[in-house]
């Protein structure tokens, strides 16, 4: 389904909503397809296709709101969707903060961010890539004796968002990925690990062999687990996990948690919330970016900005609704953040280990151990014991604990080893000290 067809459906839905008496309305119409091929132990195991489409409509009758959606694009189904949303609105309570984002904030002359790179890949070709990936992982070491499989996936889609301010915009996008997970065993003890690559443009991904090699190497290094003593140690979060710390910070400055007063960073705008070395920038207009967009889910123009500068919080993440609840203006973040880049402190991974000296390198965390109100943080973890800047042996079944407010203020370095591309681009993060509880 092409962009023009989606645009026509959105215009028809808005017209029907106005005819039904809605004071305002907004609609999102999307269509997408995808393919995923997985292999295990050299044999094709699963072939999955998806073909999705949907229309989501929100109507406003003054300060009353109704919402309905459908996966049917027929004229009658669209009419039924509009009627359903309007009927719901009539029975909802008024909320003075309901409504479209301000018309003056709508994006104008939206730029092409080069997000659409479709790839013609047959099942046979995808299967062969996955087999190459898995074979590369299995060849790393004879102790790798089993596999959870390798996957090659691709997806593409397009959408149109429109509202009764007269805004209408949308674009196609694509995403491709390769991943692999294998299992190593020695003396009856088994360990698993994985690796992956993903990008808007398949040409920007690592090769299947490189992904498999990394998956195999990461798995083998986890063999030979030894216990450690409970204590207070520096903790280095490996780059793929470090983005989770950043996600926790972003959740704490997001509108919903702020107006509900369920954030450990309430009333922190302009305050020192992290170590002076921490700088986080939001860059919505990166070409081929995994979270790039010229406008947010409400049509509001997105803009580059500093979220955290020298450890000081410069802005929140707000939609129009949360902004009104807080007496502020939307930041163009309805739907989330757009390409967060955490400035590194110019150390590579080995230099971070040397800075840490003796402590724990964390490569995996388990469970959901963050209290968003207090900031208390406790997660099951696995990784490696480090002495004098050298990895000594793997560890598992440990717990790392602290308070994320303290953790942010005691970041001592951010590595230059970010995994690219990424929607949250950060290298490994070294925390000065945390409680590490061993089994």
Image (tube, rainbow, N blue to C red):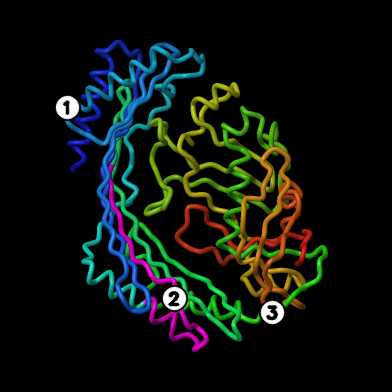
Can you tell which quarter of the image residue 225 is in?
A: bottom right
Q: Position of residue 297 (x, y in %)?
A: 40, 34
Residue at position x 31%, y 53% from top?
A: 174
Q: Where is residue 378 in the image (x, y as percent from the top left)?
A: 71, 53
Instruction: Say whether disc 3 or disc 1 marks the residue closer to the N-terminus.
Output: 1
Left or right, 132 with respect to 95, comes to: left
State yes or no: residue 243 in magenta: no
Q: Mark 3 points at which residue?
A: 393
Q: What element carries label 1?
A: helix
Indicate whether 343 appears above or below 204. above
Indicate whether 97 appears above or below 379. above
Q: How crowded is mark 2: few (under 14 residues within 10 Å), some or many (20 or more)?
A: many
Q: Mark 2 points at which residue?
A: 147
Q: Mark 1 points at which residue?
A: 75
The one nearer the camera, 359 or 400, is: 400
Alpha-carbon distance for marks 2 and 3?
23 Å
Residue at position x 72%, y 74% from top?
A: 385
Alpha-carbon distance for marks 3 and 1?
64 Å
Can you tell which quarter of the image residue 165 is in?
A: top left
Q: How crowded is mark 3: few (under 14 residues within 10 Å), some or many (20 or more)?
A: some
Instruction: Say whether disc 2 or disc 1 marks the residue closer to the N-terminus.
Output: 1
Q: How many marks?
A: 3
Residue at position x 21%, y 66% from top?
A: 122
Left or right, 300 with respect to 418, comes to: left
Instruction: Name the mark nearer the viewer: 2 or 3.
Output: 2
Q: Position of residue 97 (x, y in %)?
A: 51, 18
- Magenta residue span: 133-158
The one nearer the camera, 85 or 97, is: 85
Instruction: Say whether disc 2 or disc 3 marks the residue closer to the N-terminus.
Output: 2
Alpha-carbon distance for marks 2 and 1?
49 Å
**Circles 2 and 1 in contact, beta carbons < 8 Å:** no
């Amino acid at each position: 389904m092409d962009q023009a067809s989606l645009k026509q459906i959105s215009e028809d839905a808005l017209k029907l909503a106005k005819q039904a008496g809605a004071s305002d309305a907004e609609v999102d119409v999307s269509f997408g397809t995808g393919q995923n091929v997985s292999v295990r132990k050299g044999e094709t195991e699963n072939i999955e296709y998806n073909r999705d489409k949907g229309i989501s409509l929100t109507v406003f009758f003054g300060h009353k709101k109704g919402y309905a959606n459908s996966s049917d694009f027929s004229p009658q189904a669209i009419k039924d969707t509009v009627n359903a949303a309007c009927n719901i609105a009539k029975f909802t309570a008024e909320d003075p903060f309901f409504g479209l984002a301000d018309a003056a904030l709508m994006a104008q002359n939206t730029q092409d961010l080069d997000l659409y790179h479709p790839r013609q890949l047959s099942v046979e070709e995808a299967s062969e890539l996955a087999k190459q990936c898995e074979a590369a992982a299995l060849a790393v070491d004879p102790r790798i004796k089993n596999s959870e499989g390798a996957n090659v996936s691709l997806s593409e889609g397009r959408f149109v968002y429109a509202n009764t301010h007269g805004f209408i915009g949308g674009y196609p996008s694509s995403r491709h990925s390769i991943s692999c997970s294998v299992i190593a065993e020695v003396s009856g003890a088994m360990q698993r690990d994985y690796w992956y690559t993903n990008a808007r443009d398949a040409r920007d991904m690592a090769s299947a062999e490189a992904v498999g090699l990394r998956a195999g190497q990461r798995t083998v290094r986890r063999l030979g687990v030894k216990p450690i003593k409970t204590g207070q140690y520096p903790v280095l979060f490996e780059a793929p996990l470090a983005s989770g710390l950043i996600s926790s910070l972003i959740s704490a400055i997001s509108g919903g948690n702020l107006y509900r007063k369920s954030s450990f960073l309430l009333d922190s705008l302009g305050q020192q919330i992290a170590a002076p070395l921490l700088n986080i920038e939001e860059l919505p207009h990166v070409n081929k970016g995994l979270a790039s967009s010229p406008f947010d889910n409400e049509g509001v123009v997105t803009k580059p900005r500093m979220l955290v500068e020298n450890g000081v919080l410069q802005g929140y993440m707000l939609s129009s609704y949360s902004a009104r609840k807080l007496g502020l203006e939307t930041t163009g973040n309805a739907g989330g953040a757009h390409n967060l880049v955490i400035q590194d402190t110019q150390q590579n991974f080995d230099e971070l280990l040397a800075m840490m000296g003796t402590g724990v390198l964390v490569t995996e965390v388990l469970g959901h151990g963050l209290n968003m109100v207090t900031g208390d943080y406790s997660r099951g973890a696995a990784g490696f014991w480090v002495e004098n800047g050298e990895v000594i042996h793997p560890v598992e079944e440990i717990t790392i604990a602290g308070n994320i407010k303290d953790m942010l203020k005691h970041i001592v370095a951010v590595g230059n080893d970010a995994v690219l591309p990424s929607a949250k681009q950060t290298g490994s993060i070294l925390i000065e000290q945390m409680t590490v509880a061993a089994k």
